[in-house]
Image (cartoon, rainbow, N blue to C red):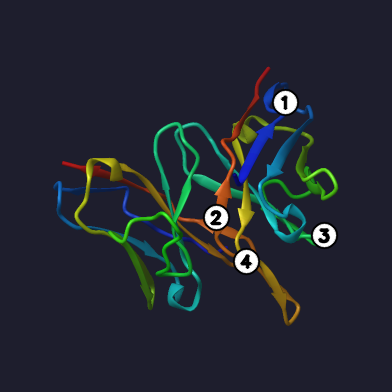
């Protein structure tokens, strides 16, 4: 069964750090681009970050650039999101998602649909 | 930055057709994907690249995209279709629509 399982969420104080993990199974993890998407309580979906299949290319939403770092360990079939300098507005459920067909062409990269999602992990930033 | 606008809510009678719009500047030139999210659950992909259905998604779900508007159509609406629906494109970064709550009456 194709599956993504997030972990690592919790309560953290403003300015603190947290590392989320996303364990993949049931597919060849190293062949797929991956994303993080978050959803604040009662709000809509917001894209956070993307990494290509070998980890050599990443991109971030402006709201997290310089504070969050996406990475992956293809040997462990695991995606990560290191979150530093956390703010109250980072409070959300964080989902990892598989990219169905990302590619780069002519110097620009394009992601496909997010075809597999994890169940999400809750991050609460509060004192 | 690129923005996608959806109606806040759409109501549809049981068995009738619901249409959810997603507005964006020249969205017809982009690949649009649609997600269904039920309360307390992760999103599920229901349409990819404008009009394609993933395996397991009923034929009642269809999509189109032209000009400045993409549309998700749910035919013969069922109670189980009640959910939030989000459109999404890639424009140097991921962009989600504002989301539409579908209510089946």
Earlier sequence position, callout 4 versus callout 2: 4
Residue, disc 1: A14
Q: Secondary structure at mark 4?
A: loop
Which residue is depicted at the point 68% across and 23% down?
A10
- Chain ID at mark 2: A
| First in sequence: mark 2 vs mark 1 | 1
Horizontal relation, residue A125 to residue B26: left or right: right
Residue B55's disc is none
Answer with the quarter of the image where residue A33 lies. Answer: bottom right
- Quarter holding the C terminus of chain A is top right
Residue at 63% from the left image edge and 61% from the top image edge: B93
Measured in 3D between alpha carbons, the distance from the residue under mark 3 to the one under mark 1, in whole angstroms, is 32 Å
Residue ID for mark 4: A101
Q: Position of residue B92 (x, y in %)?
A: 64, 66
Residue at which label 3 appears: A54
Inter-mark Cα distance, 2 to 3: 19 Å
Q: Name the residue located 63 percent from the left edge and 65 percent from the top edge.
A: A111
Q: Which mark is residue A115?
A: 2
Q: Which of the two discs, 4 and 3, labels the residue nearer the N terminus?
A: 3
What separation in Å lies between label 2 and label 1 (alpha carbons)? 33 Å
Query: N-terminal of the two: label 1 or label 4?
Result: 1
């Amino acid at each position: 069964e194709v599956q993504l399982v997030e972990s690592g969420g919790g309560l953290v104080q403003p300015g603190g750090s947290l590392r989320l993990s996303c364990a993949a199974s049931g597919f060849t993890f190293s062949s797929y681009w991956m994303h993080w998407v978050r959803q604040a309580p009662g709000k809509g979906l917001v894209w956070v970050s993307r990494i290509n299949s070998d980890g050599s290319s990443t991109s971030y939403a402006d709201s997290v650039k310089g504070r969050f770092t996406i990475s992956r360990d293809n040997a462990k079939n695991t995606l990560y999101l290191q979150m530093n300098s956390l703010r109250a507005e980072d409070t959300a459920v964080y989902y990892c998602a598989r990219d169905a067909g990302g590619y780069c062409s002519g110097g620009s990269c394009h992601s496909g649909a997010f075809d597999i999602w994890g169940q999400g992990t809750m991050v609460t930033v509060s004192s | 930055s690129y923005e996608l606008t959806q109606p806040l809510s759409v109501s549809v009678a049981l068995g009738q057709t619901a249409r959810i719009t997603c507005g964006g500047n020249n969205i017809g030139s982009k690949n649009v994907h649609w997600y269904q999210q039920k309360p307390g659950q992760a999103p599920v992909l229901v349409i990819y690249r404008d009009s394609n259905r993933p395996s397991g998604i009923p034929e009642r779900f269809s999509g189109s995209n032209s000009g400045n508007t993409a549309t998700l159509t749910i035919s013969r609406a069922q109670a189980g279709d009640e959910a939030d629906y989000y459109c999404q494109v890639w424009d140097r970064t991921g962009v989600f629509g504002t989301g539409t709550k579908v209510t089946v009456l």
